[in-house]
Image (tube, grey):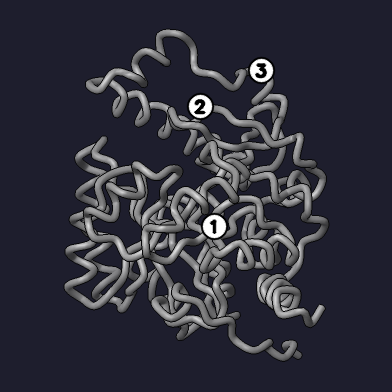
């Protein structure tokens, strides 16, 4: 029997997204399988589809995958759009995915790593909303100039691509911009969820906490790595995608080191070569992350995770995670 749902929490973000609780299951490669996305939305938050995870890792044709999720829940879902201009073929595919998503009724989009204007134009024409990942004010101001509706504020405690501000510093830096702010990074328990709302954020985005759920289809070793990790075991590396990325320290990470070499660092800084280098790192890391998440531990393991791992002690259903967080925020637990 499903536990009774706590009362909704209304914020500017939940009102825009049409959901009950200000919780996003962030898009994750390779962890965003249809069942996880649907479970978070069904429980009153919003799950975000990561299109490469859906098609490449979990083997769904894109439109069919969206329809499968919608068969599992009639609640809103979202789509993640990486808008960096790197590989023309990928950009064309992303445009196709967005068109299909809009045709299938998706109205919430999260953009990252580039100019979101073309996404904003397409989504707004259909009555949808766009939030953009930012790590500091200058990127926030650029995104707002392109018409985004809200900001995903990625702090230094985040898994995957992390920022360099604390949650408090980032909120203070962005609070006067007049749009909903969603904290991304470091929320592994209900206490930190409540603290984010008390700080003034309109919601949170969680990734690592939702990897350690029953619905997330990763190898048991990935679950175990998160459960056993302390905050100190989370390290930043720029060898996955050319930008800082938080991972669990494993033998492979220790062997590779966490900093790009001098030649790669120069290429990453140079305007004419940085996109090529990021593409090279990303394609290589896609293979490693897929292998690690599905096949278990080996010397090649790379497990993305944030510092919230230190507060995660068991695998449990996504809906129960959300209900407990909400009850804590409402002073019911």
Q: Quadrant of residue 183?
A: bottom right
Dot 1 or dot 2: first in sequence order is 1
| Spatial CA span between label 1 and label 3 | 32 Å
Dot 1 or dot 3: first in sequence order is 1
CA neighbours of label 3 inside 10 A, class few (<14), some (14 to 19), many (20+): few
- Disc 2 to disc 3: CB gap under 8 Å: no
Which residue is drawn at the image coordinates 46% and 64% (left, top)? Answer: 48
Image: 173 above or below 8:
above
Where disc 1 sits, the SS reads: strand
| Spatial CA span between label 1 and label 2 | 22 Å
Task: Between label 2 and label 3, give the one nearer the viewer.
Answer: 2
Q: Quadrant of the C terminus?
A: bottom right
Image: 123 above or below 141:
below
Along the line of sight, the residue nearer the viewer: 311 or 3: 311
The residue indicated by pointer 3 is: 255
Q: Quadrant of the N terminus?
A: bottom right
Which residue is drawn at the image coordinates 67% and 64% (left, top)? Answer: 193
Q: Position of residue 299 (x, y in %)?
A: 69, 27
Is residue 24 among what the camera can see?
Answer: no
Q: Could you say which disc has been placed on residue 183 in the image? A: 1
Q: Position of residue 96 (x, y in %)?
A: 22, 59
Where disc 2 sits, the SS reads: loop
């Amino acid at each position: 029997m499903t536990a009774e749902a706590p009362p909704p929490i209304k914020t500017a973000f939940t009102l825009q997204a049409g959901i009950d609780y200000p919780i996003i299951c962030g898009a994750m490669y390779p962890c965003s399988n249809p069942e996880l996305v649907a479970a978070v939305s069904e429980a009153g938050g919003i799950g975000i589809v990561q299109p490469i995870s859906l098609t490449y890792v979990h083997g769904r044709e894109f439109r069919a995958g969206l329809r499968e999720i919608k068969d599992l829940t009639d609640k809103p879902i979202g789509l993640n759009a990486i808008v960096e201009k790197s590989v023309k073929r990928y950009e064309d595919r992303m445009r196709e995915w967005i068109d299909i998503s809009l045709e299938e009724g998706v109205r919430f989009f999260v953009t990252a790593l580039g100019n979101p204007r073309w996404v904003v134009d397409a989504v707004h024409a259909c009555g949808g909303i766009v939030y953009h990942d930012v790590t500091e004010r200058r990127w926030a101001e650029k995104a707002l100039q392109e018409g985004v509706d809200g900001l995903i504020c990625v702090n230094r405690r985040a898994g995957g691509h992390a920022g360099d501000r604390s949650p408090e510093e980032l909120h203070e830096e962005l609070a006067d911009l007049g749009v909903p702010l969603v904290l991304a990074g470091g929320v592994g328990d209900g206490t930190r969820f409540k603290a984010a709302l008390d700080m003034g954020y309109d919601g949170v985005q969680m990734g690592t906490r939702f990897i350690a759920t029953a619905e997330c289809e990763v190898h048991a070793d990935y679950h175990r790595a998160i459960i056993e990790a302390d905050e100190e075991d989370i390290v930043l590396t720029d060898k996955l995608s050319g930008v800082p990325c938080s991972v669990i320290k494993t033998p492979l990470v220790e062997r590779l080191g966490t900093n790009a070499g001098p030649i790669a660092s120069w290429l990453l800084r140079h305007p004419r070569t940085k996109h090529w280098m990021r593409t090279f790192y990303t394609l290589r890391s896609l293979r490693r992350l897929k292998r690690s998440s599905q096949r278990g531990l080996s010397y090649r393991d790379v497990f993305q995770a944030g510092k919230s791992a230190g507060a995660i002690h068991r695998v449990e259903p996504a809906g129960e995670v959300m209900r407990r967080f909400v009850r804590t925020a409402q002073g019911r637990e």
